[in-house]
Each structure stands twice: as C-alpha cells, then as structure tokens.
Image (cartoon, helix red, strand yellow):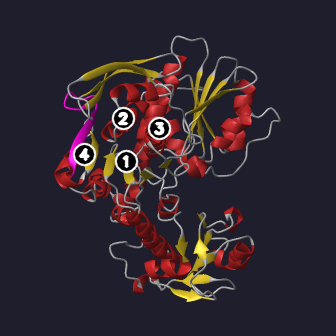
Amino acid sequence: MIRLSLDEISAAVGGRLHRADGSETVSANVEFDSREIRPGGLFVAVPGERVDGHDFAAQAVADGAAGVLAAREVDAPAVIVPPADEQDRSGVMALAADTDGSGAAVLTALARLSRYVVDRLLRLTVVGVTGSSGKTSTKDLIAQMLEPLGPTVAPPGSFNNELGHPWTALRADEDTRHMVLELSARGVGHIAALCAAAPPRIGAVLNVGSAHLGEFGSREAIARAKGELVEALPGEAEGGIAVLNADDPLVTAMAERTKARVVLVGQSPEAQVRAENIVIDDQARPSFTLVTTAGSTAGENRAAVTLPLHGEHHVGNALTAAAIALELGASFAEVTERLGGVRRISARRMEVAETVDGVTVVNDSYNANPESVRAALKTLASMTRDKPGRAWAVLGVMGELGDTGGDAHDDIGRLAVRLNIDRLVVVGEQARPMHRGAWLEGSWGEESVLVPDVEAAVALLRAELRPGDVVLTKASKVAALWRVAEALLDPSGEAGRDGDPA
C-alpha cells in the first residue's frame, strides 16, 4: 500500500472523517481481518454472515491500525463511506449487487480506493486472467514468470471477487512492477467492475466452459461475461494486449471485442505461442516443444520444455504465462528456463503426495466443473497406465450447473469407465448420477460405489487401498473432499479438517 492520509482516503472514496483530523497516515497493509492488522494499516470493516467488522474497529486501532474504512460510525478514527447508491463510482460499479446496505457501501468504497491507488502507480502493469477453469493455476504461473522481471503482486489462492480483488490491488506500492489478478464472475458486469477497480493492460482468457452454467444459462452467456476483460483493455497504441486461447472458438471470437493487440496461444497452427509434440510421462507431467513468434525476439523460436506439474491441462496455462512474460520483456531463453522450474503454489490443486503405506494421493479438491474433472480424470489415468497400482477416483458434486447438472454428472461417470479408472467412489446423494452413468456405461458392479459422506469414503478407502494405488479427490468446494485426501495422508487417522483453504 502506498502511504495515504485518512484525508486522502476520504477524498478518494467520497467519505467523511470521523474521530480523526485527517493527518493519520496509512503506511502498511489494508485488511478486513482485524487479526492481520500491522502498525500503520487500514482496517476495512466488512459486514459478514457471522460477524460484522464494525464490531472490531476499536480493537484494530488498538492493535496499531491508523484508521478504519467503515459504513457507520465506530469507536475509532475512521473514514465513513456513503451508501453504495449515493457513491460517485466513476465506472467502479459495486460488485456486490446481492449484498445489502453497509456491505455494498464498504465494498464499493474499497474498489474506488483500489482504483485511486492503481492510477497513482504509473510504472505498474496490471495483468488480468479469467476463464471457466484454470484461473488460479495460471495466475500462479504468470506471477512466477514475472517476478524475475520486477516485484510482482498476486492474490493468494482464488481470491478473485469483489473483496479479494481490491484487497490484492492495495498490496501494490511504488516498487511494484507487475500485478497479476484473477477475475471471477457470478453474472454479467462483474468482470467489467473488477477491471474498473484495477484496470488491466494485459488480459488473458483461458477458456469458456460450463462452470456457473446454472447462473448464466448458456456457454454463450458465459463468453459474453468473460469477454468483458478484453473489452476493458486499452488499445494497441496504448500497449493493450489480449492473450486468447486459439483452441477455444468462443475465446478466439473475443478478438473482435477488443481494441488491444491479440496474441493467440494454444496448439493451433495460428497460435503465436504454441505447444507441439506434447508427451505425458508416468506421473502425468507434460513435455512439449514451445514454439513462439511473439515477444521482442524476431523470427520463430523453438525449445523443449518439461513442466514439473501434474496434468496435460497445464500446457495451456503455461503457454499463457509464457506469452505474457515474453510481452513484458523476458527473452525466449529465460521463458523456457523458468517454465522448467515453476511449482504449484495454491493449495488443493493437483497436489500430489504419498502416504506412509505407498499410496499416491492427488488432491485436486478445491473446486470442480465438468471440464476440470475431465482433465483430472485424464491425469489419473496417465499416472496409473501400465502400472500394477489401481486408479481410484473419489468424486463429489459439481455445483452451479443448473438444469444440465444431471447429464453432466452422468457424463463424468461414463468417462471414468472409458478411461479405465479401476474404482469410482461417488460421495453424496447429489452426485448419484455419476454412479449411475458409470454403471450404465460399463455395467459396473463393485467398481463404482455411492457413499453418503466423507467419513464413509475414508472408511472404504482405508479398508481397500493397497500400496501403489493412486487416489484422486475432486468435487466442488461445498463437498469438502480435501478431507478425504487429508485423512489418507494423516497417520493419526483423523478425517481431515473442515477449513476452507485460503
């Protein structure tokens, strides 16, 4: 965070000072969790489902906060923001359309403060990433590729909404050169609003799938929402760059919606950054030939790359990261070297570990949609092909699919059969169509089983797993299937923790 007085913050968000003369200076972190406040920080009083941040304002200041951003008067120096519908948003729309009262007011003001700070950082390049799947992994890859080029800020995990987005933007200061932001959407206009809070110069769209199909109604509607990112980019003359997946027609069509220069990535011959000769090893780690005609180096460049990540789907993510690094000044040699040294950062995304009994656990349980589950199943099949160990897929519900949910779950069950997955453990009644689809596709008996909950899945696995087996856990966040993975890896025998990862 750059140094700002409460008077400057008040002017930026259109608020008023309360129990402060305005000279109080914010010189540290901006936090909505009072326990994370450091001396000189700004506490953002966000009302939540269980607690109201306003109740912790005085304690945050006692712990060192310079002031509070609040929707009502508190017992502490504060900037009191106006109601959301009275704020001059200047293009920064309140993302929390489904948030009432003080929550929307504070979030709108936080977005305005984010915009104020980002506009002050003239040497900062903001990179935005969106897509139906792979956003977090790609964001992590981009940040790793850019860090050697200068100080880089990126959010932890999937902190990509109306709270996490401006919170991340406010981590930047005068030394920051790159900010990599992940943009999510629950409806039309959400990505445009995120872009208004921290305007990107480079935007990458990974894919258009069926995540949130129940909310949007069609993949075309999802594409309209995801394309708001490229619409927000500056023109080519101002340095705007849209990185688009050449292998997804709904994404490549977005080239018509942007004034920015378009860089295509993928396996298509039209892609300026592409992968050829993809090979997957026995741990599902992909190798390929990286071919580029993008970046500062003239002509075509080719080099062999091996990603130390599990899953062929990471190839597309890596191409996006490579394209952005090339555009921001990395040489081709630097890009190929860095790709070979990237690592998984965010938790519970293709996290591979081994139990004391020699069972491999692939924890990909943070979230799920049909596309990501298909990719995970293919990874599992690669890791067990031509090996004595069995492939176990422990799958749960894929949420927010609307009327397509039944068919989508049925399709996943059938795919498990076609990929020769040895055992399918379906967790929870909502995911029953997976079990039914597997049974109908392969006339399975005990190969597929429906269990009621995590505890039943853990008991089954502990009773039947053998050394050399590989277990994949995958479902939407609500199913909390990371508890299965953690229970298998925990020698104490506990069934894992209920907490949600950062």
Query: For the residue carrying disc 1, how many other residues have a C-alpha within 10 Å: few (<14), some (14-19), or many (20+)?
Result: many
Tell me if residue 431 comes above or below residue 294 in the rendering.
Answer: below
Q: Say what secondary structure mark 4 lies in.
A: helix
Q: Is residue 123 above or below residue 375?
A: below
- Residue at left 43%, top 73%? 112
Question: Which residue corresponds to mark 4?
Answer: 250
Q: Which residue is mark 3?
A: 148
Look at mark 2 in the image and give the residue it sits on. Answer: 330
Q: Disc 2 to disc 1, how far (Cα)?
A: 24 Å
Q: In the image, what residue type sits under mark 4?
A: Leu
Q: Report the residue marked by disc 1.
A: 131
Task: Answer few, some or many: residues within 10 Å of disc 3's Cα (few below 14, many 20 plus, some between 14 and 19).
Answer: few
* Nearest-to-viewer mark from 4 and 2: 2
Residue at image location 32% in from the left, 46% down from the top: 205
User: Is 275 included in the stretch rendered in magenta?
Assistant: no
Is tag 4's residue or tag 2's residue first in the polypeptide sequence? 4
State the image quarter where residue 235 is shown. Answer: bottom left
